[in-house]
Image: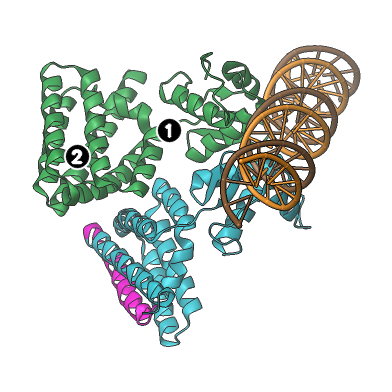
Chain colours: A cyan, B green, C brown, D orange
Amino acid sequence: MAASGEPAAGEAVALVVNALRDGIMQGRFAPGQRLPEADLVELYSASRGAVRTALVQLENEGIVERERNRGARVRPISLEEAVEITEARAVIEGLCAAKAAARATDEDRHRLRALGKELGEAVAAADVMAYTRINQQIHRAVRDIAAHETAGLMLDRLRTQSVRYHYTVALLPGRPSIGLTEHLQVIETVCSGDPALAEHTMRTHLMSVVEALQQLDANLHRIVTPG
Amino acid sequence: MAASGEPAAGEAVALVVNALRDGIMQGRFAPGQRLPEADLVELYSASRGAVRTALVQLENEGIVERERNRGARVRPISLEEAVEITEARAVIEGLCAAKAAARATDEDRHRLRALGKELGEAVAAADVMAYTRINQQIHRAVRDIAAHETAGLMLDRLRTQSVRYHYTVALLPGRPSIGLTEHLQVIETVCSGDPALAEHTMRTHLMSVVEALQQLDANLHRIVTPG
DNA sequence: GTAACCAAGATTGTTAACAACTTCGTTGCC
DNA sequence: GGCAACGAAGTTGTTAACAATCTTGGTTAC
C-alpha cells in the first residue's frame, strides 16, 4: 500500500477507487488528462488488476472515460451536464427536505439552526472556504435527517461528478449573500415541519445555483474570449 | 453471453455484466442466491478476471452484494427499499415530465396519445403482459422527450434495482384500471405543455405505485403467514 | 515536399497460476 | 454427549506473464 499506516486487510481495488476519486475531485488530475494504468500502478503501489478494476468502476460512476485499447482519461463535464446534475440534485434534495421536515426532532432543528448561524458568520467574515464547508454540512444534515438511503446514494454519485464546478460557484460576487438567505429559508422551512414548503425552498435554492452556474460560465467565456 | 455467435471483439467484462444483470432482472437468479465465480466462469465462458470485475460493477449498481472472502450474492430488496426507489423515481420522472411538457413536439404528442390508446386497449382486454410493456413504453417516451441524460442514467439504475418488484404490481386486482387513468392524465398534462402540471400528475401516479407496493406487500404477508 | 507505409515502442486486454481466507467435517478430549 | 481444536476442501484475493492493439517516429517512393 501507499500509506504506511494500516495493512488495510485487503480489497486493494477499493483503495485505488477511493484514492483516484479523491484525486480527481480535488483537481489533482485535470479534465481530459490521460490516466495510463502503469502510472497509477506506480502512484498507488497497486497491482494492474486492481487499477484496471478501479477504472471500470469510476467509468461506471461517470468521472472517467475509457476507450477500447486507448486507455482511460478524466471525463470533462460540460456546462449543460453541470446544469443537468444540479437539476437532478434539486429534485432529489427536495425529496430529502420534505422527508426531513416530516422527521426532524428538536435536536435536529437545533443543529440545523446552529449551522445556519455559522454560515452567517462565514459570510460576514467573507470566508469562502468556511462558507463552502458549512454549505456542504447543511445539505448533508438535511440528507441525514431524511434518512433516505436511496436518495443519499444518488446524491453521493452526483456530487462526485459535479464537485469541480460546484466549489467555484461560491466565488461569484454576491453569491455567498444570496446563498445565505436561501439556506436560512431552507433551514426554517425544514424546521417548520411542512414537507411541501421545505421541498419548495430547497428546489428554489438549487435552481438558483443553476443560474449561478450559467452566470459563471458566461464569465469564463468573457475571460477566454476577450471582446 | 452463452450464445456461440460472435467472438464479440472484446471487452469481455461488459458481456458478463450485461448477461448477469439480465439474468438477475429476469429472475433466473433468486434474491440471496450465491454467485460463485467459478460457476459464472463456466456459465458465460469468461475468464475469472472478467467475472470478478463484472461482480464489482454490479455491486456498484446495487443488485449484487459482496462480502470479503465470502463471495457475491444477489442482493435482496426489502419493501422499504422498493418504496424508496419508487419515491426517487417519482421526483426524477417528475423532472422528466416537466421537461417533456416544455419540449414536446406535435409528433411527440401524437406518439404519446397513441400509446395511451394502446394502454386502454390492453386494459380492456385484461392483457397484463401488454399493459406492463406499454406502461414501460410510456415512461420511456416521456424520458426520451425530456432529453435529460443525467436523469435517464439515474432511472436506468433505479429500474435495474426495482424491476422484480415492479412487474408484479400490475397483478393487483384493479391496478391496471387505476394505472390507465393515471397514465392518461400524465399524457394529457405533458401534451398540454404545462411543466408544473405534468410534474404533478407524474408524481401522483408514482406515489400511487408506492401505495400499490405496500398493498402488494400486505397481500404477500397474508399468504406467507396464514392467520 | 508530401503522403503512404512500416517498424519499434508503449499501452491495454486476457489468461493462468499462486496465496490467503473461510467453511465444514472430523477427531480427540473433557 | 458435548465442545473445542484441527485439517482438508472450496472459494476468493492477488500478482505476474503473455497476447493483441494502438501510437509514434522515421523512411521511402512518388
Q: Is residue A222 above or below residue B100?
A: below
Residue beneath disc 2: B205
Residue A116 coordinates in the image, percent (x, y):
38, 75
Residue beneath disc 1: B77
Residue A136 in sight from this viewpoint: no
Q: Residue A211 has which mark?
A: none
- Observer-nearest residue: C25 or D2? C25
Q: Is residue B98 above or below residue C17?
A: below
> Helix, strand or loop at disc 2?
helix
Q: Is residue B196 above or below residue B60?
A: below
Residue B150 coordinates in the image, percent (x, y):
37, 49
Residue A220 coordinates in the image, percent (x, y):
41, 73
Quadrant showing the C terminus of chain B: top left
Amino acid type at image mark 2: His
Was residue A1 drawn as part of the magenta stretch in this picture? no
The picture quadrant where one finds residue B113 is: top left
Q: Which residues are magenta?
A: A172-196
Q: Main secondary structure of the magenta part?
A: helix
Q: Nearer the viewer, mark 1 or mark 2?
A: 2
Q: Is residue A180 above or below residue D26?
A: below
Q: Residue at x 12, y 30 (%)?
A: B114
- Observer-nearest residue: A119 or B160? B160
Looking at marks 1 and 2 on the same chain, the residue that comes earlier in the sequence is marked by 1
The picture quadrant where one finds residue B34 is: top right
Q: Residue at x 38, y 38 (%)?
A: B156
Judging from the image, mark 2 belongs to the subunit labelled B
The picture quadrant where one finds residue B155 is: top left
> Helix, strand or loop at disc 1?
loop
